[in-house]
Amino acid sequence: MRLPPAILGNAEEVLREILRFTSPADVTLSRYFKDHPRLGGRERGAIAECVYAVLRQKSFFTDFAGTGASMRRLTVLGMAEAIGADSLGGLSEDETALLTRIKEIDRSLLPPKKLANLPDWLYDKFVAQYGEEETLALAAVLNTAAPLDLRVNSLKADRDKVIAELATAPIAAEPTPYSALGLRIWKKPALQNLPLFKEGAIEVQDEGSQVLAQLLGARRGEMVVDFCAGAGGKTLAIGAIMRSTGRLYAFDVSEKRLTKLKPRLARSGLSNVHPVVIAHERDAKVKRLAGKIDRVLVDAPCSGMGTLRRNPDVKWRQQPEGIAELTEKQASILDGAARLVKFGGRLVYATCSLLDEENEGIVQGFLASHPDFELVPMHKVLAEQRIPLEMGDYLKMLPHKHGTDGFFAAVLERKAAPVKAVADESDEDAVAE
């Protein structure tokens, strides 16, 4: 069934705005669909997939379409890539010939940089870090769409029962290999109307993110902080691991992001989560808990290069100088969060970046200036948590090797001291207010 020719016009219009790279692609798409309520679900899906196809293949498409390639040509190439040329109507002879020519190209014969579809600066960084062969393997997967991963809420459901119930929808889901609560769906069904979703039995969360939450090793009754909680995906996973006991603070500088946690928290059945807006990593609310927290997760703001399957615009919006600014912020956040950790407590530093300077570089710099912390080898933590992954000192999950988004994590421990601090309940309550 062919799409109405007018849909190409809609796709061209929104693509023109997105390629200005003034805001994230998903935000621009959401706003466009809100402004065009007459577009049906099939049309919205085709437009979104067209946009993401162009963002993933922009370097190749632009080069193929020729100097001064029009937005219309890029849109036609993207739509054909997304839904197939046979589904397009209203094409000119020139556009039909364009699609015929692109089918005849053996893309494997393209120069490596064109094949990778990465900005030159990012391609060069990846090659320096991974080598050319692995960079091309990584880029090939980054230029495909990610599957949909779910986390089963262990407070409310069992993974096998969720698989069976999804099958009645019918939605085919398979267990993820590393997270014992993860499910993978290769299509993208609407979940929001499913009873399982409404009742809080499932949450959308990449398997790699689920693994990060598990690395914290949170236990019942402990005091735990998710330092950069955002919309709370890892917060909810940690809360379920704690069986809704103890006290779990969700800190973030963005009230808007924490607001998105509230409906998810209500569905989850958790009662131990306390969302707290902080001004910065040195906020007085943070200082009140200094030295009192058993476990702290720092999922630091980063370049997001590990999420390019979901957010392909990031590689074009991010710039090298932006990475330098991020590393300063990451070091400062980790330093601030470390003050919370009690003696013998655990600190997990994580990013969804694939770049060493945001990952090992930050951890090594932290350890050099914080002799009271030591690195816990990742292979030891994975064995402790019974996660079937082989790693060295750090967690490095890669899309082309593990099927997840790209994630990095390091587990740090504050060396034990002889005297155990007694928590001041009044301070804890003051933070939660």
Image (tube, rainbow, N blue to C red):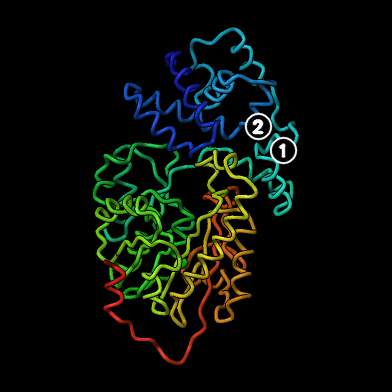
Estimate the x, y position of residue 136 in percent, counting from the top left. Answer: 68, 43
Query: Is 395 positioned to the left or the right of 187 in the image?
Result: right
* Of the pair 373 and 334, the residue shown nearer to us: 334
The vertical placement of 63 against 322, above or below, is above
* Of the pair 395 and 390, the residue shown nearer to us: 395
Residue beneath label 1, please? 113
Query: Is 202 positioned to the left or the right of 358 in the image?
Result: left
Estimate the x, y position of residue 35 in percent, counting from the top left. Answer: 35, 27
Query: Regarding mark 1 in the picture, which secondary structure is present there?
Result: helix
Disc 1, disc 2: CB below 8 Å?
Answer: yes
Q: Amino acid at mark 2?
A: Ser
Considering only order in the chain, which callout, 2 or 1, is on the residue closer to the N terminus? Answer: 2
Residue farthest toward the bottom in the current orientation of the protein: 418
Instruction: Report the Cα–Cα distance between label 1 and label 2.
Output: 9 Å
Q: Amino acid at mark 1?
A: Lys
Tell me which corner region of the image, top left, top right, bottom left or bottom right, holds residue 47: top left
Estimate the x, y position of residue 389 in percent, counting from the top left. Answer: 55, 62
Query: Is 368 positioned to the left or the right of 307 in the image?
Result: right
Q: Which corner quadrant holds the N terminus?
A: top left
Residue beneath label 2, please? 59
Check disc 1: other Cα within 10 Å, few if <14, some if 14-19, many if 20+.
some
Query: Is 112 positioned to the left or the right of 423 in the image?
Result: right
Check disc 2: other Cα within 10 Å, few if <14, some if 14-19, many if 20+.
some
The vertical placement of 370 against 407, above or below, is below
